[in-house]
Amino acid sequence: IFNPKTACSENYHFSQPGNFIYQAQQKQLSGEFAVIRHKDTKILDNLILDIQNDNGLTGCGADNNNYKSKQSSFSLKWVSPIAAEICMDEIGKQCTGLYFNKR
């Protein structure tokens, strides 16, 4: 994913059984992920990233924060049976234009 605001590429790799790797410039994060599905279709599903490792180097936008042992949560606004837009809010109004695809 190319982020024009930072002129930087970010790479996300999700693999089974629930592992992910994130890379941006020198920064690399890894850990586990889960998709939490809600029975009520009015509530957006959640993508949870449990960050277990951070190499401590600089990523996009000069981000050198250490995310080890942190958790990130995003909402998923499904646009098809296999693709969901990643959103920053719980109601799907602040979406990123990035998509999570099931295989």
Image (cartoon, grey):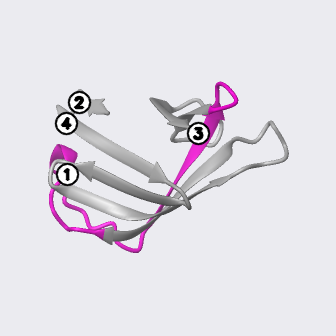
Q: CA distance from mark 2 to mark 1?
A: 13 Å
What amino acid is at disc 3? Answer: Arg
Dot placed on the residue nearer the N-terminal end, 3 or 2: 2
The quarter of the picture where the N terminus appears is: top left
Is residue 20 positioned above or below 10 on the image?
below
What residue does disc 3 label? 103
Instruction: Describe residue 28's horizontal placement relative to residue 75 as left or right.
Output: left
Residue 57, horizontal then vertical, whole percent: 15, 62
- Does dot 4 land on a helix, a strand or a loop? strand
- The numbered mark at residue 48 is none
Q: Count the marks: how many?
A: 4
Residue at image location 24% in from the left, 63% down from the top: 65
Of the two numbered discs 4 and 1 on the same chain, state the one appearing first in sequence. 4
SS class of the residue under badge 1? Answer: loop
Q: Mark 4 highlights which residue?
A: 8
Q: Identify the residue under disc 1.
A: 59
Q: Amino acid at mark 1?
A: Gly
* Mark 2 Cα shell of 10 Å, populated few (<14), some (14-19), many (≥20): few
Q: Position of residue 83 (x, y in %)?
A: 59, 31
Distance CA(mark 2)–CA(mark 4): 8 Å
Q: Which residues are magenta?
A: 54-82
Residue 47 lies within the magenta run: no
Front residue (pair 103, 59): 103
From the image, state whether disc 3 or disc 4 is nearer to you: 3
Q: Which mark is residue 5?
A: 2
The answer for how far apart the CA atoms under marks 4 and 1 are is: 9 Å
Q: Hey, what amino acid is under mark 2?
A: Lys
Q: Residue furthest right?
A: 40
Q: Nearer the viewer, mark 1 or mark 3?
A: 3
Badge 1 density bin: few <14, some 14–19, many ≥20, Cα 10 Å: some
Image quadrant in which you'd find residue 54: bottom left
> Marks 2 and 4: CB-CB under 8 Å?
no
